[in-house]
Structures are given as C-alpha cells and as structure tokens.
Amino acid sequence: MKRIRVIPTLLLKNGGVVKTRQFRNSVYVGDPINAVKIFNEKEVDELILLDIDASRKKRPPDIQMVEKIASECFMPVAYGGGISDLDQVRSLFSAGVEKVVINSSLRSNPEMVRCAANTFGSQSIVASLDTKRTWLGKHKTYTSCGTKCTRLGVIEAARMAVELGVGEIYLNSIERDGTQKGYDINLIRQVTNSVSVPIIAAGGAQSITDFFAAVSEGYASAVSAGSMFVFHGVHRAVLISYPSQDLLMEQLYKKVA
Amino acid sequence: MITIIDYGAGNLASIRNMLRSLNAECEISSDPKKISRAQKLILPGVGAFDHGMHSLRELGLIDILSQKVLVEKTPILGICLGVQLFTKRSDEGTLTGLGWIDAETVQFDKAAFTVNERVPHMGWRNVELNQPSRLAEDLPTDSRFYFVHSYHLRCHSPSDVLFSASYGYSFPSGIEKENIYGVQFHPEKSHRFGKKLLANYAALN
C-alpha cells in the first residue's frame, strides 16, 4: 500500500475560483475561502492555488488574499502566479503557504529561482511547466498562462528547472486542461524519465483510474486535478468533491506497488 | 504558554494557526529572555541543517536552549528540521548538531527506492507507534501525517524511537527522550491527526 498525493488545483481570477478548458473559457466556480474550507473539511492531501491572471497582467501576488486562504488550511498549500522576486517569495511563506509555484520566472528570472531554492530549500519550490504539442508532436513549454511559447522542449525545460534547484515539477498539459480525457501519460513518462525530482501530473483527470495510470504508467509521484473536484456530471454543475479515503485506498493506494 | 522559536527557518504561521484553533496560548519569539521564561518550546524548521544551526548560533540561542532543555527539563517539540537539529550531525552539512539525542541525520538510501519513490520525500504516511506515549494519546489508529524531507534520523538508542514511518524502508519519524520530543512530519499541516498530536503536546505538564 502506498499513499499517493491527490491534489486539487484551484484557479484564481478576479478574487474568485474559476475553471478553464485548455487554458481558456474560464467558468466561475465560487468563492475561494468557501472552496478552501470545504477542501479542508474533506481532509485533502494538499492544495495548489494558481492565480491565472497575475503573470498575464504583470501583477504581483495578492499576499493578503493568500494569507486569508492559508489560515483556513490545515494541509500543505502551494501558491503560484505573478511571482517575480525574492521578497514576494518571502512574504508568501510568512503568509502561511508551504510552497511557491514558479512558471514565467523560470525563464525571465532564473537566478531568483536558484536563490529561492537556496534560501528556503528545494522542497518549497515547485516548477510549473505548461506544455502543448507542436504539429510535429513535440511538447513545448509555455509561460504567462499558456500565452507565450518558450520554444523549449519539455525535457529541456524540466532539466533546467531541476538545475536551478526546484524540488518538484507540476506538469500540465494545456491540451488536456479541463477536458477530463485523462492525463497525457506519454508526456508524464518523458519527464519522469529525464529528471529525478517528484512529478505532479496535471491536466485531464476524470477519475481515480486516471490517477492510477499517471502513477503506474507515467511514474508520477503525485496527481492533481481541477474539473474532477469542482464539477459534477455531464452538465458540469459546480460541486466541490474529493474521493473518500476508502475509495482512494481501494482504487489507488493498494494497487500501487 | 508555548514559545515557538523563530530562527528564520520555517512556516511559523501554520503552527500558530493550529495552536490557536486549539485555544493553546502561544508566542513566536527569537528573544533569549522570552525563551528563558518559556514553559514549553517548539523548534520548527524547514531548510538546510547548517543554515539552521548557524541561525541558532547567530541569535545566541544555543546556550539558553541547552539550559532549558537539558538542565531545567522544559518540554521541547522539534518539527522536521527542528528534530534533526537535536541529533549529533547531518549528512546534509558540516556543523555539529545540538546532540541532545544519540542519533544522526542521514540521507535517504535511494538504492531501496522504486521508480516513483523520489527525494525529497513528500506526502502522507501512516506512522507506527513504537511505545506508549502521552504525545500519541488517543491518536486514531489510521492517523496519517504529512512529510517533506530529504534526510531522516538514524537513532542509536532504539528506546528513543516513538514513531516509525516507511518510505522505501522504515525510518524513525518521531522521538521521545524524557522532555525531548520530535517529529519528522508536519503536525501543523496534518489535519485532525496533527491537531490531536499538538493538543497532546499542549496538554503535557
């Protein structure tokens, strides 16, 4: 039996929680404090909060809001969005988050990332890689919430991030985001085969079966999902949920060698 | 009053939040005078071993902590890096540890790992209780705790080991020696399980 981290990702925009499909068409899901309270009651393993507006609008993290959210969380919380300097990283940690998630700054300010990993420890710095396939089928990485292509292949980007000292990689597929068609296992395996840090699989999860596939076939160390935890049924009615321990035990932990 | 030692290493807000939700009185301080008056201590910690030892020294806290813990027998709870600093040394650094327990801090032996077991070790584990303890009183049998670490304790005196957890292999995840308590996991981030453990610590007298 092995416990695998199952992590809801909450996207923040204009002070609310939203959910996107392929990084577009964001739908309002609810109030962040309320959502976080529900996830706290459901005893989720960890929570990832991503402000999807910050980098695109060149806005710094809203520390006050993060502090309010983090004070409701008795589980580890990671925050990402608009982090561009070390002072912001420091403020986020004192606001009560355990990890910061960095994407755009991996390219625009790599020294800041290195410095953050040295100061606060690798375990608290997560690199987020948003990927999309070119017409030749190669996975390229994107910044600024999927709007800017870095021209870097995903393996190269992952290796660079690890070299900067990140302790974990949050690997997202832009094409699968919000589609609930299952993870891109091939993408996950490419990255887990190339670096030694834990990979969190994201983008496309619909069921615990998808979690199991990401771990058993993709070798991911943890799994994340958005739609699966905030929508219910074919009409995507808003309903915050999280699988019970018994269900995770039967369908995931016990099956993972 | 529980004094949480602020030595620039760790997420103190989370510990304070959890203690507040238990209505346990606490303060965050790096002031040797306040620490000398503390009834109970928590040494939190995230980050590198040498950085932690160096900060304790820079802040002039090592002598007062040794006085409190070894002479006055004030209860202390080390969390994560905090408990690692109680050991004699660490694979992670070159500085000498506090040496309060007969143990050292060693790197995970990756030879015993499967393909998705990686370092840092991050995630929830059930822990095994090795001996009865007031710290573990009434903890649910399915208790799980959140771990984030790349190094773990190796205890030379088995009677000090309170909890064990397994990641690749079994390692000590909690210690107890007289008034000295420590856990490798983060009770402040472990839902009702960690809350119960911290409530037990707050209730010790």
Image: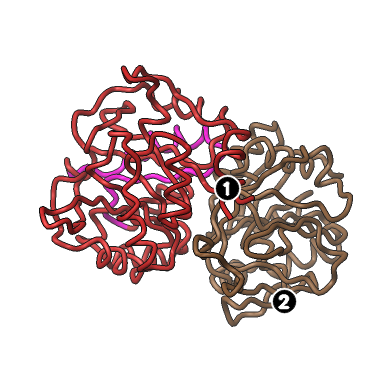
Identify the residue at horizontal 85%, vertical 71% (top origin). B157
Marking on residue A255: 1
**Membership of A84 in magenta stretch:** yes
In the picture, which chain is brown?
Answer: B
In depth, the one of B199 and A190 nearer the eye is A190
Count the labels in the image: 2
In the picture of the structure, the residue carrying the numbered disc 2 is: B88
**Chain letter of the residue beneath label 2 in the structure image:** B
**Membership of A183 in magenta stretch:** no
Identify the residue at horizontal 80%, vertical 54% (top origin). B75
Residue type at mark 2: give it.
Answer: Lys
- The percent position of residue A152, horizontal first and vertical second, equals 18, 63
- The percent position of residue B175, horizontal first and vertical second, equals 78, 60
Magenta residues, as a range? A58-85
In depth, the one of B108 and A79 nearer the eye is B108
Label 1 neighbour load within 10 Å: few <14, some 14-19, many 20+: few
Q: Which residue ends up furthest to the left in the rendered image?
A: A135
